[in-house]
Image (cartoon, rainbow, N blue to C red):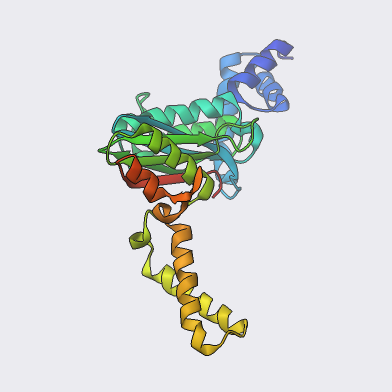
Amino acid sequence: MASYTAEDVKRLREATAAGMLDCKKALDEADGDFDKAVEIIRVKGLKGVTKREGRTTSNGVVLAKAEGNLGVMLELACETDFVAKGERFIELAEELLAHLFTSKISALDAFLASTLPSGATVQVRIDEGNATLGEKIELRRIALLEGSPVAIYLHRTNPDLPPQLGVLVQTTTEAPEAGKDVAQHIAAFAPQYLDRDAVPAEAIANERHIAEETARNEGKPEAAIEKIVAGRVTGFVKEVSLLEQAFAKDAKKTVQQVLDEAKTAVSAFHRFRVGQ
């Protein structure tokens, strides 16, 4: 019988995030050799990666970093909140974030194929996390903004979990307070586009069609339908366009007015929420 203690099992659990039974089996198989047991868990975990591919990753973390004219953000997803708040999962997310910041790669596929300082690719490192944590782990998306000041905002939707909502906002001039305020506004109001010019024509056409059908179903007079539809489409554009939204901290002002007062403008933004 393999010689190991309860402390060895605890240490192996902390090192691999594997379950207690799996740790005991690995130590049995390794005849008590800790390093060999770690390798056994890793190999068995990697063999299970394919089996986990179809699982849903509805938990995870959003992390961001900004310095001067560069800001990056990522969403690393997992299956359970237990793993999401675990030290090893957060360390993996922070490692990927640091690499994203230094590599300045904006395309997800290219980033996954890029090489970390350790010599492994990002995808291989994620697969290793997948194996040791025993859950499906995936880097769902990344964002990079550079060239002018970038503000960030991270929000914990649950105090027991790491940040699961994050925003990057790029301003045309240095305006840290306005940048932070607008980032918090975006987190709360989830605009889809920067301004009305950015709203796709198909989205407006679809909204117009829905508004027209709704007005007719409500029995509105035919002569009034065009005006009603125009009003509802205008309301839709204001709802989804950042610059036309009523500002979160002062509903009497639009976001555009707040930016004008700060003598700056928003050139781009990204909003990530885990699972959305």
- In the image, residue 199 sits, relative to residue 63, either above or below, namely below
Q: Quadrant of residue 23?
A: top right
Q: Residue 224 versus residue 217: which sits nearer the camera?
A: 224
Q: Residue 198 versus residue 85: which sits nearer the camera?
A: 198
Q: Position of residue 113 (x, y in %)?
A: 35, 39
Residue 108 in view: no
- In the image, residue 248 sits, relative to residue 7, either above or below, namely below
Q: In the rendered view, does 50 fall on the left or right side of 102?
A: right
Q: In the rendered view, does 165 fall on the left or right side of 182?
A: right
Residue drawn at x 47%, y 79% is 227
Q: In the rendered view, does 247 fall on the left or right side of 29?
A: left
Residue drawn at x 39%, y 37% is 178
Which quadrant does the N terminus fall into?
top right
Task: Pick out the residue farthest to the bottom.
Answer: 222
Q: Position of residue 11 (x, y in %)?
A: 64, 15
Q: Residue 2 versus residue 263: which sits nearer the camera?
A: 263
Q: Quadrant of residue 85?
A: top right
Q: Quadrant of residue 156?
A: top right
- In the image, residue 229 sits, relative to residue 270, either above or below, namely below
Q: Position of residue 25 (x, y in %)?
A: 70, 24
Residue drawn at x 62%, y 81% is 218
